[in-house]
């Protein structure tokens, strides 16, 4: 059966000292929390990976926010999947809308990144989602279908089964405007159907699909109560241990 997961995406926030402090706080809070019913992951800037790995326990998962589309070589400024894995990280966010929008990441590039991440036994948290115009003109289901098909449908069923998906409507990211629980459920059920069509019902049923976009302690319970919403990918609210834990304990 699929796992419930709450993952933080710190984005480009915190200095190293602040980040290590935040990771320690989350780690401590998680250790002391009585009844945690989900896996918990923090995805942090590259510079923070190794120092954060050194201060957290196995109970808290660690991930990067991106990795390169090449394995090594003359790619100044890039960080490869093997480098990420060598820090102790187990996850990597790929295809975040901010990477697609500001850094020109296409499905072809993301396909490479997914393959390289899987080759290092990193679990990709693969993001998909429509922009406001696509929500308003009614093409949002098709847009997300295409994002999944283009980047992921070259994978074997076994490899597809290693992915976590995150539906993040771009209009809900950092805007305070959350998708309603019904809007999230509609899309998550659609995504599961798209997976089932290609890989069969078992692979689809076992895939964790997270919701992201202005998720906070006050709305997490309602979102997570939906049948096809298996957790959250959390931006702003992951930058404070108490609010992040408020989401973790919403399960
Ligand atoms: P916010 O939770 O800040 O809206 O960000 C969501 C997100 O982009 C997580 O990847």
Image: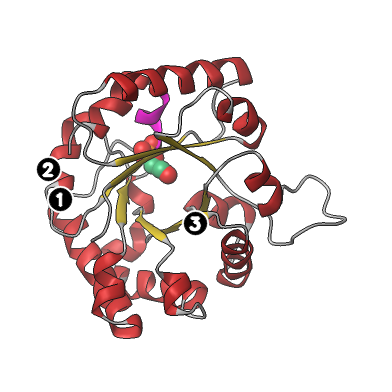
* Residue 237 among magenta residues: yes
Residue beneath label 1, please? 181
Q: Residue at x 63, y 68 (%)?
A: 112
Looking at the picture, does residue 135 appear above or below residue 241?
below
Q: Are marks 1 and 2 in contact (CB under 8 Å)?
A: yes
User: How far is the residue under mark 2 from the one under mark 3?
Assistant: 26 Å
Whole-percent x, y for residue 223 in the image: 17, 46
Residue beneath label 3, please? 124
Horizontal side of residue 164 vs 138, given as left or right: right
Give me the disc on residue 163.
none
Whole-percent x, y for residue 12 in the image: 57, 33
Q: Residue at x 62, y 57 (%)?
A: 120
Horizontal side of residue 102 vs 241, given as left or right: right
Whole-percent x, y for residue 133 in the image: 35, 61
Q: Are marks 1 and 3 in contact (CB under 8 Å)?
A: no
Q: Residue at x 67, y 31 (%)?
A: 47
Residue at disc 1, CB closer than 8 Å to ligand 1: no
Which comes before the other along the chain, label 1 or label 2? 1
What secondary structure predominates along the stretch shown in magenta?
A: helix
Residue at disc 3, CB closer than 8 Å to ligand 1: no
Residue beneath label 2, please? 222
User: How far is the residue under mark 1 from the one under mark 3?
Assistant: 24 Å
Q: Residues within 10 Å of mark 3 (few under 14, many from 20)?
A: many
Q: Quadrant of residue 116?
A: bottom right
Q: Quadrant of residue 166?
A: bottom left
Whole-percent x, y for residue 94 in the image: 53, 55
Q: Residue furthest right?
A: 74
């Amino acid at each position: 059966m699929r796992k419930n997961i709450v993952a933080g995406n710190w984005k480009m926030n915190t200095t190293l000292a602040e980040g290590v402090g935040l990771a320690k706080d989350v780690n401590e809070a998680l250790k002391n929390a009585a009844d945690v019913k989900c896996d918990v992951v923090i995805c942090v800037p590259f510079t923070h990976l190794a120092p954060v790995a050194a201060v957290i326990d196995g109970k808290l998962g660690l991930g990067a926010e991106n990795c390169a589309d090449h394995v090594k070589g003359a790619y100044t400024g890039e960080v490869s999947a093997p480098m990420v894995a060598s820090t102790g990280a187990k996850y990597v966010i790929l295809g975040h809308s901010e990477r697609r929008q500001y850094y020109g990441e296409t499905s072809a590039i993301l396909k490479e990144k997914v393959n390289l991440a899987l080759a290092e036994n990193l679990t990709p948290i693969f993001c998909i989602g429509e922009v406001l115009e696509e929500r308003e003109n009614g093409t949002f289901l098709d847009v997300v279908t295409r994002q999944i098909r283009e980047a992921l449908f070259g994978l074997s069923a076994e490899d597809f089964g290693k992915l976590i998906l995150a539906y993040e409507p771009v209009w809900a990211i950092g805007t305070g405007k959350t998708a309603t629980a019904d809007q999230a459920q509609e899309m998550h059920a659609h995504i599961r159907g798209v997976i089932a069509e290609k890989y069969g019902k078992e692979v689809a049923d076992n895939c964790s699909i997270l919701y992201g976009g202005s998720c906070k302690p006050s709305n997490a319970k309602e979102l997570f109560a939906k049948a096809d919403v298996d957790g959250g990918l959390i931006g702003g609210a992951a930058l404070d241990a108490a609010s992040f834990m408020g989401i973790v304990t919403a399960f």
